[in-house]
Amino acid sequence: MVLDNWPILASYFEREGAPIGETELATQILGIYSLPEEWQRLDSSGVVDNWPWTVKFSDLSFSDGKLIPKELSEDEKKEAESKSKKKPEPPKKGAKPEETSKEELDRQERERLEKEERERKYQEEWNALDEKGRFHKKKETPTEEPWFSFANNPLSILKSGDKLVDLEDEINGNKGTFIEFTKLAPADDDPKKRPKAKTNISPDEIKPIHCVGWVDYNDFHVNPGLKEISLRVPFMLKETYEKKLQLDGERKGTGTALLDNSESQIVLPDELSDYVLAKKTYAYIKISLSAPINPPTPENPLPDPHDMIKRENKTFKQITPDEIASDFRKQLKIAIEAIAKEYVNFMGDAKNNLIKKEKTNVLSNIRKEERDSNITKFLYHFNISGKAELLKEKLKRYLVRIVREIYKKRTNIIGVFKDQRDQFYSQLFAYATDEVKLAMDEYVFLKKDELHEHIISSYDQSRKEVMQYAIKLYKEVKKNFFI
C-alpha cells in the first residue's frame, strides 16, 4: 500500500463504505471576474434587463447577478470632488492670501503617510505573487475592473439519501462537477417587445449567454476531514464544450491533448475560438460542508494489519485415522481420474462403446495385445513427461500422515532392523494396495460409461483374475485342511 494514500483509505474504513446521514452543502459566489466586453455592452444596453444573470451549481440557483462597474480609486474620487467644487474667488487686490492652518497641514501630512504605507504594503503583496496570483489580484480589485456580484449569497442545500451518494461519487469518483453561468431569455420573451437600446449595440450581440466550468473536488478527496474549499473556476462557452466533446470522440486514441482545464493554460484548436476563454473569465467560489464526506483519519497511529483483519483462534482438532484414510482415498480418486483423462488425451476418445456392442466382455487375444501395448506406451509417456512424479509427490504427504497417525511411526525407519523394516513396508504396501483397489472400484462404478474402453477391459480382466486366484486358493485350502 502506498503510504500517501493511507489517509484516504483509513477515512473510507472510518465511514464504512457508502455515506450515511446527511450534510449541508453551502456555496458562496464571491464574484465572477475578467468579464468580456461583449457581456458589459449587453448588460448596459438595457435591451435584455429581464434576462437574469444566473449561476447554477449542485441543485442551487443564484439568479440575482448584478454587474458592478469599476470603482473609483481614492485619488480619482478626490479629483472628481475637486472638479465638482467651485473654484475659490481670487483674493482682492492688496489683500493678503489666507494662510493654511496648522491642523490642515497636519491632516495633509497624515494622509500622505497613510497613502505611502498603503502603496508600500500593496507593492509587497504584489511582489510576493506569481503570475497567476497577480492576474487574480488585479481582476478582483474593484478599482481595476468591473465584476459580477450576487446578493442572495450564500445558498445551502441538505444532501441526504441518493443526493448524498451522488455527492460522494462526485468527490471520490469524478473528482468534481459542473457549474453553469447563464443569461438566458425567459419563456415569454418577445424580441419585438424588447426595450429600445440605451447604447449603440449590434443586433447580433443580443443573444443568450451560456457558460460552463469544472469545479475541482480533488481537495475534498485527498484531504479527509476537509469541510471547506475556495477555488477559481475558469469558464468556457457551452458550445465550445460540446464541440470539444465531439472532437475528443473523433480524435480518441490519437494522444492529442485537446483541452487542459487548468487556470493558467487552456488550449483549443483555432476552430474553437471562444471569447470567454480568451478573456480567461472565471468564478471565485467557496464551498463548505457541515460534515465531511470523507471523515478525518483516526488520531491513533496506523493500526497493524493483524489488528484490522482479526481472525478467530480456532481450537485444534486432532485428526482421526478414519479421516486420514478418507482423505487418502479422495486423493486416490482424483489421481485415478487424472490418469484416465490423460489416457483419453493420449489415445483418443474411445469411451466404453465397443464393449457395449459385444455380448460379453471377453476380448480377443489380438485386441488384448493391442490394448496392453497401448497401455505400455502410455505408461512410458506418462513417466517421462514428469506427470507421474507430480502425482507421486502429491500422494507422498498423505502416505506420511498414514505412517505417523495410523502406524504410529514418527521417527526415521532407516535404523530399524531389517526384518522389522521389511515387515512395516509389507504392511504399508498392503494397506495402500487395498485403498487403491477400493478407490478404483468406487470410481469405475460411478464413471464406467465415461471411461476409455481399454481401462474398463483391463479393470474387468484384473478383477476376474483376482477372483480366479481367490477360488484357486480356496480350493487348495479346502483340499489340505478338510480331507
Image: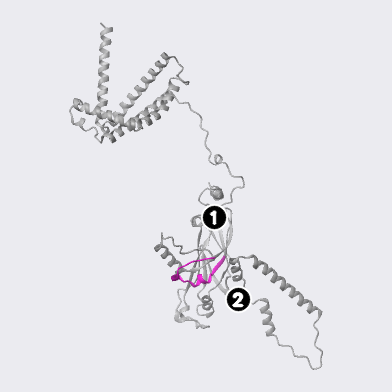
In the image, what residue type sits under mark 2? Lys
The region drawn magenta spans: 264-284
- Quadrant including the C terminus: top left
In the image, what residue type sits under mark 1? His
Q: Nearer the N terminus, badge 1 or badge 2?
A: 2
How many numbered marks have been drawn onto this rendered protein structure?
2
Q: Residue furthest bottom?
A: 93
Q: Which mark is residue 70?
A: 2
Mark 1–mark 2 Cα distance, whole angstroms, equals 37 Å
Residue 78 in percent (x, y) is at 69, 80
Q: Which mark is residue 221?
A: 1
Instruction: Out of 53 and 306, give the one closest to the viewer.
Output: 306
Instruction: Out of 132 and 225, give the one closest to the viewer.
Output: 132
Name the colour scheme.
one colour
Label 1: state its secondary structure.
helix
Residue 315 in percent (x, y) is at 51, 30
Vertical placement of residue 175 versus 74, above or below: above
Residue 179 vs residue 327: left or right? right
